[in-house]
């Protein structure tokens, strides 16, 4: 078996696929990772031991894959590969900016930020290490937002590498979300919005545990048993769908569709239609990775890949 269609949108593949578009596919092949273009292998590199623990990002002609101890930069324009190694036991998601990518590395609960230049595949910034784990990381307009030890929110000017804001919470914070001129997160049972680093607004939202998406009108969040869509102005739950133990979710206008959510849980993948207010498709399995490229989503388990082609 190579690829099996479940319906027009969902496909199973027995290869471990890192990336796929109309022309290119990057996948594991025994001890190598091969890059195929139009069904021909155009380049390859050695597969790391812990290849399941990776993150990937696409910037113009560059495809960047970061593993636990190495970075691979593929230039799709000339089909060349550059690699480098670093030290760490865990990595954060990759964040692209300008001609660079940054990510966090974690070792023995100590963390640091690493910045690589894409053109040279060269490490240009390596921060001092923190005595905290990085739990979440975001970048916007020259500022790096980092959640440390599920309680400390630290904002850094990435050019000068100075801390411009810091806030510590007594209760656990799972993640942070950027929007407008600020960011938001859930602490206790409260949704907390912080604008311009000084205006703090608190909202009591029913059943809120983990925030997945926020805009000016509504939030999408989950507790242990359900996914909710809550309208901030009217203060009403417009959608409530049973999905147990949601790990993460793709909710992005223009990437899937406004009415479709893809949720990864401990039991597998659930596709939710917010208009119909129900789960329209589910796939059992333990998926270690959940990545979105344009409208397409890749889910990896140990021995197979599920591809979801968005609208």
Image (cartoon, rainbow, N blue to C red):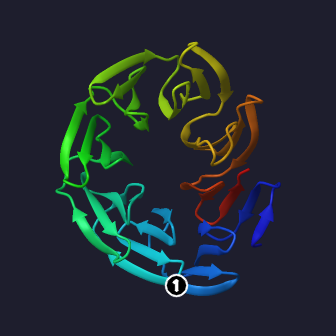
Residue 2: quarter of image: bottom right
**Residue located beneath label 1 in the image:** 78
Q: Is residue 138 left or right of residue 281?
A: left
Disc 1 is placed on an element classified as loop
Residue 235: quarter of image: top right
Q: Closer to the camera, 144 or 90?
A: 144
Q: Is residue 291 left or right of residue 152?
A: right
Please name the residue shown 70% across and 31% down the image. 274
* Residue 48 seen in the current view: no
Q: Is residue 200 above or below residue 2?
A: above
Please name the residue shown 23% across and 64% down the image. 125
Q: Is residue 47 above or below residue 153?
A: below
Q: Is residue 240 left or right of residue 140?
A: right
The quadrant in which the N terminus is found is: bottom right
Q: Is residue 93 left or right of residue 170?
A: right
Please name the residue shown 54% across and 86% down the image. 43
x, y percent for residue 171: 31, 26
Q: Closer to the camera, 137 or 14?
A: 137
x, y percent for residue 83: 38, 79
Q: Is residue 52 above or below residue 31?
A: above
x, y percent for residue 12: 73, 62
């Amino acid at each position: 078996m190579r690829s099996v269609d479940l319906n027009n949108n969902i496909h199973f593949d027995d290869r471990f696929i890192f990336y796929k578009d109309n022309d290119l596919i990057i996948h594991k092949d025994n001890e190598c990772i091969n890059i195929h273009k139009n069904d021909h292998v155009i380049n390859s590199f050695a597969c790391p031991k812990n290849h399941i623990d990776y993150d990937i990002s696409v910037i113009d002609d560059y495809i960047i894959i970061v593993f636990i101890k190495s970075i691979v930069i593929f230039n799709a324009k000339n089909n060349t590969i550059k690699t480098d190694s670093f030290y760490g036991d865990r990595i954060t998601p990759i964040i692209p900016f300008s001609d660079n990518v940054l990510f966090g590395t974690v070792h023995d609960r100590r963390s640091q930020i690493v910045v690589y230049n894409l053109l040279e595949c060269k490490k240009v910034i390596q921060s001092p290490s923190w005595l905290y784990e990085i739990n979440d990381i975001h970048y916007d307009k020259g500022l790096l937002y980092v959640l440390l030890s599920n309680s400390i929110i630290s904002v850094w000017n990435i050019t000068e590498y100075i801390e411009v804001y810091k806030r510590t919470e007594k209760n656990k914070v799972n993640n942070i979300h950027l929007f407008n001129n600020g960011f938001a997160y859930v602490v206790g049972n409260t949704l907390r919005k912080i604008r311009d680093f000084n205006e703090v607004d608190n909202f009591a939202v029913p059943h809120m545990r983990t925030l997945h998406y926020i805009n000016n009108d509504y939030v999408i969040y989950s507790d242990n048993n359900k996914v909710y869509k809550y309208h901030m102005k009217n203060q009403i739950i417009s959608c409530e769908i049973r999905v147990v133990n949601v790990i993460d979710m793709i909710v992005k206008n223009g990437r899937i569709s406004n009415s479709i959510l893809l949720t990864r849980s401990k039991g597998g993948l659930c596709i939710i239609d917010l208009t119909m207010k129900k789960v329209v498709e589910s796939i059992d399995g333990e998926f270690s990775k959940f990545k979105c490229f344009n409208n397409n989503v890749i889910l990896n388990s140990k021995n197979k890949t599920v591809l979801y082609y968005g609208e």
